[in-house]
Image (cartoon, rainbow, N blue to C red):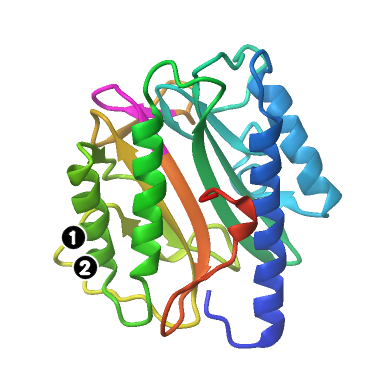
Amino acid sequence: MSITKESELIGMKKISEVVGTTLKLMREYAEIGMSTKELDEYGGNILKSYGAKSAPYETYGFPGYTCISINEEAAHGIPSENKILKEGDLINIDVSAELNGFWSDNGGSFIIGKDLHNYQPLVDASKNILRKAISNIKGGVKISEIGYLIETEAKKSGFKVIKNLAGHGVGRSLHEEPENILNYRVKSNRERFKKNTTVAIETFISTNSTVAVELNDGWTLVGNKGGYVTQHEQTILVTDSYPVILTESNEIWD
């Protein structure tokens, strides 16, 4: 959305702090032996305590308050009593919600307990690339150039990007224009970031796959060639210089 008055900025800051704090607290709460359903219920209760509504549940009828993806799952993992967190698991939590007509979105991948399977380089690449991408966004910058930066940095780290998942505008709904803030460059896309707009920027960094495909449950996405995917996401306000990180309360870079 385009921020045109102070009340809109206050609204976006408020919901962004809520989803950021929820993500941070869920990450801290997650432990070995816990089901992803229990972790999701915990996150759902935090959102409710703020008066916020889960965006995937409200918008798409998603069977959970948050998306929790484990190991080979790339995104949109359904919380389940049958999915129990184990030492060394790669987990991604994506939290988006609505409050007072404003929507915000954030996410992060991390490892439960010890890094038994050497996922940390993939997690670090996703985190660091997101930070670098965001630091290069300001009004007038081509969206395709940020996609080029993300893919180039991924390749430097020995990884690939998922090409059919993308960042997006956010604010008055969960997904708005610009719809395709992709992790690679589409040369024909001449669209530019606009000052005073709110967008969700997210990385999808992968070991093997370049396309996410949907499983039979109608939600969960996995890589077309297997392997693992990490995602980190912040909702930001585009300015003339360094963006305002609205979801910084998630502390995904700390």
Q: x%, y% of residue 62?
A: 61, 37
Q: Would you say residue 179 is visible in this rendering?
A: no
Q: Is residue 204 above or below residue 36?
A: below
Which residue appears at 85% of the width and 48% of the height? Answer: 49
Q: Would you say residue 215 is visible in this rendering?
A: yes
Q: Is residue 227 magenta?
A: yes
- Give, as a three-letter code, the residue at label 1: Val
Quadrant housing residue 36: top right
Which residue appears at 66% of the width and 33% of the height? Answer: 64
Q: Which residues are magenta?
A: 221-230
The Cα atoms of the two marked residues, 2 and 1, are separated by 6 Å
Q: Is residue 252 above or below residue 210?
A: below
- Give, as a three-letter code, the residue at label 2: Asn
Q: x%, y% of residue 224?
A: 26, 27
Circle 2 Cα neighbour tier, 10 Å, few/some/many (<14 / 14–19 / ≥20): few
Labels 2 and 1 touching (C-beta < 8 A): yes
Q: Which residue is mark 2?
A: 189
Q: Which residue is mark 1?
A: 186
Direction from residue 105 to residue 121 in the image, left or right: left
Q: The residue tagged with tag 2: helix, strand or loop?
A: loop
- Asked whether 177 or 3 is in front, the reply is 3
Q: x%, y% of residue 92?
A: 51, 34
Q: What mark, if any, has residue 222 been given in the picture?
A: none
Q: Is residue 249 above or below residue 137?
A: above
